[in-house]
Each structure stands twice: as C-alpha cells, then as structure tokens.
Amino acid sequence: MRTCVSPKGYFICGIHNSSFLVKNLRENEHLMDLGTFEDGLPCVNKANFPTGDLHVTGADPVFEISNAFPFRGVTYINTRWADKNAKDPAGSIRLPRPGDVSFSSVLSAWKHGSPVPREEKINMLASLPEPLKLALAETGTDPDDLVSLAHMACSFVYDSKTGRPEGLGYTKEAGGRISAKIYDNTLFEVLANNPYLPEVYRQVMVLRPGVQGANPIVGEYVSPDGASHVYEYLRSNSYIPWGHYAANMAEDSIRYCLDDLRIQDMRGMRHLYYQRSFVCLARDFGIDVDAGQSTLDQNELESLRCRILDLLADEENLKNMVFNRTLWGWNYGFDYAPTKYRLHASHQQIHQQYAMIPKNTDMTRIAGGKMASYAIGDLVAQFISEYHGKTGVCFFDAYMAAIENNCRMEGSGEGEQSLVVYSDENVLVFVPKAQTSQWELQVMVRPPVGNILEADTAVRNSLDAAILAGAKALSALGARMITFYEISSRMDAQNNGQRLLYVLLPRLPESPGAFSESQLRWINGHYPEDFAAACRAAI
C-alpha cells in the first residue's frame, strides 16, 4: 500500500540517486556576453552550450516519502537543501519578522527631517496608485499613515468633544437593509485587519458585534477570570451546507497574534465548539438541554456527552441521528496582496469555525435517493480498514510506534532523531514524516479516540493545549498564516482504532502551491527531524 507506515512500526522511505544520459539535439551555439567580471574580462554564456551528449552524474539525491495517508500524496526532500538546514535547524528554519513601514518617515526624509503638513501628506497618499495604497494598508506600521488611509476607505462618525471615531456612517437601502458607507471595500478590509491601525478605529470598523452583518450571536464564553470573552456567531447562509458557527474573540478580548493568545482563549473557542456539537446531537436524540440562555460548564458538558454516548450504544437510536460528523477549522492570520489576491482568512482577529455534517444528502436525479455526505475523516476510515485487511495491524498503532521509533531519513545515528514537538499522556504534537507543507505539524490523540464525542474532559483539555502549543511553535518560527483542520471519525461507526487528528499547515512566502502541489507532490527543503528540533527550540 502507498503509505510510509510499515505494519512493523517504522517508516519506509525511498531515495532517488540520479545518473542518466541526455542526447544533445541542439544544432547552434548562441554565445554572448552576459557582462564583465571585476578584472574587466567578459562573462560569457559558454556553459549553456555544451558540445556532445551529456552524462549527468552526482545529481542531488532526493528522498521520496509516501504520506502516511495515501490520499495526501507524496513528499520529496532535496538532500542538498536539507543537509544545509540540518547544520543549524533552530537558526536556519525560521522566517524573519517584518520590519517597520512608514510612509510619513519617507516623506520626512525627503524633507531632510522636517515634518510634512498633514494635509499635504493626505493628498500624496490619496494620489498613490491603488496597488501602492493596498500595500501600505497591509504592511504599514505607522498609525498616522493608516488613519489617513482609513478616511479614504469609509465614512466615520466622530465624538463632538474628543474627535475620536465612535461609529460608521450608515444608509438604509430599499427593503430596510442597513449598510455602512464604505468607499473602497478592499482598502477597508485590509486596513481593518492591520493591528497597527489604532484600536478605536478597528473597533468601529470591524470588531463590534453587528458591524460585519446581522449574523445572530447564539453562544458566549467568559473565562472565570473575565479576561477571555468569545462570541459564537451563526452563519445560516453558509458555504457549508446546513450552516456553520464561528467562535470569534470579542471586542473586549482582542487577539490578533498568537503571542497574545492565552490557553483560556483557546479553551473558550473550543468549549463553544464542543458545546454546540453536543447540543446538536442531543436534539437528534430527543435530549432536552435545559440550560436556558446560558453556557454549559465543564461538568454539564461532560454529563451531556456521556448521555449521548449511552444512547449511541443502542443501534435503534442511530436511526434518529441526522448529523454524525464534525467539521472544525481555523484560518489564522490575514493577508491581501496589492494585486487584490486575498492570501488568507477573512479577518485577522482570531476566530474558529465549525459545523455538523449530516449523514446523508438528497440526490438530485433520483427521487427519494440519498448519498453519503463527504468528510475527510471517511477517507482515513476507508484507508485504515484496507490497511488492517492487508496487514492484520491497526494502522494507528503502527503509526504511533513508527513516530516513537523514528530514525533520521539518512539512516545515520547522528543528528536529531525525534519527530515529537510536544506531548502529554493524552496527545502528541509531531512533525509528519511526509509533510504536505514545509512546516506541517499534526496533533494526534494517544488513546483510541476518533472524534470529540469520544473525548472526555481530560482529552479535550489536552487537545486544546496541544493545538495552542503547535500554533505558538509555528508562530515563534515566524509563520504568520496557518490553516488548521480536524480529521475525525463518524460518531455512529464502530471503533476501528481511528485517532482524532488535527493538521496545522503554515503558508510560507516561497511556497504558494503550483503544479507540483496540485498533483499532491510536496517539495521540502529540510528533514522532518530537524524541523521538529526547531519547533522544540521555539517552544
């Protein structure tokens, strides 16, 4: 089977040692000077026009590692790049922090240090081509620049005494629809997501409940110390069938970067996810959740989970089950290119999204026909069933053993050996042997827990802490955009050893994805063990 996990509990990798003959079919030489060296001699493109056939020897060896899960493709590691990074993984596997960007400082430098009158600066900003305005709105760190741009993006209402913005200008459209007066939607969106724009502007532009639309708030979490506050929004007209929910940090708990995110914040967002999922399942089974309009505490949540599990044990009750899988994801970080390509997320204020997936959906051309709804966890279930059928071994047992018994790709006993970044008795944060992002991390549950309904309070708490630890490790290395998603089992299926899994995929500046990635061929420039070492050093 195309997987790197041997049933004997170790990883299987291939290596390409290339040596080949190339027939030279070129007829003419097109020699020309490329420039000159420091001694004045010409630099000629002679190397581009060899004579005769080519015998290629000593090409970079390339490792080929099938993903643990066949449907996620194959990873290739160039040894020359990886060997270079292996010399100092903690120092070389890192992105630089962006520097300060100030249009005002540039203008002042042109004036030999003299301040530029505000009106003159605003006029110059207004005259910039749109791509340059967007670039400054996205990368700018000078609050005064950003405030000047904000006035070009939308209409503000000001406090008559302080002059501070206290809201946006609004209009009533036909049919009673209310909309803010926004002059440039793209500029507005980019500015509202820049943490260097003064908070008072971000509050009125994007952070207050309702400013992004009339989506109902149907849940809320406040931490015991009052420092973490999360809203749960319902998105009923959603790109996800049957709607989805968004757990957003509130306007009084602003979290733009992972450095500011606390464990209580993560607990709050994840608590709303667990709560909503269990309450939806309870409805299918006729369980009355008598909580009023209040948040379930940990004990109430655990009690509800156990009641649902008891009912699931009776096959007759499964007929009442409408939703049997969960969908959870998190797009951390925001970026917008001057070319108007949105690169990640819709809002930088930290938020997570989740939904319930129905067992079936109606078929369009067969009256009364049903087809199973899609979830990525079903692909895992299908694969591990085939794996067990062919090997007699539970895949996740072999996978766990392979991670714990890992050796370096090169087979040497020197250098970093471990793939593990963080662990406790319930979870494991590790670097997959075959990464589908150059900095991919995964979080896996140790016991045979396939979904959040099978996860007790201790496991859920461990998961929350592990996801946060992985996120902070990536952020400490310089990742500014990360995609997270859950891979879980069906709640109405027999336990087949499937483990609840979370995938963390950073977006790196020079890895946007192209034809290789579209074919599930993932190109890496480091060994997974060295990346694990860099993450441990970051933590």
Image (cartoon, helix red, strand yellow):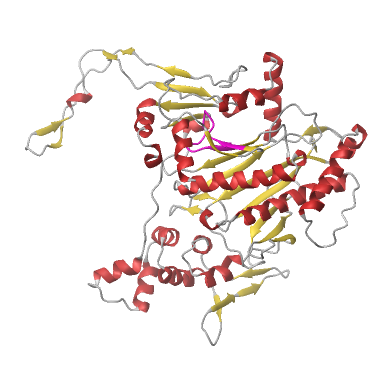
With respect to residue 431, does 345 lie above or below?
below
Across and down, in percent, residue 536 comes to: 48, 41
Note whether 477 is above or below 130 in the view shown: above
The answer to whether residue 492 of the structure is visible from this angle is yes
Q: Which residues are magenta?
A: 428-442
Identity of the residue furthest to the right in this view = 316
Left/right placement of residue 226 relative to residue 126 reads right
Mark yes or no: residue 438 visible: no
Picture residue at 43% right of the left edge, 27% below the top: 77
- Hey, which quadrant is residue 508 in on the image? top left
- How many labels were placed on the picture? 0
| Apparent side of residue 70 relative to residue 374 in the rendered image (left or right) | left
Q: Is residue 411 above or below residue 250?
A: above
365 in the magenta segment: no
Q: Residue at x 37, y 16 (%)?
A: 18
**Rendering coords of residue 214 (x, y %):** 70, 64
Q: Position of residue 249 (x, y in %)?
A: 63, 60
Above-or-below relation of 133 to 282:
below
Most prominent secondary structure in the magenta stretch?
Answer: loop
Name the foreground residue: 121 vs 496.
496
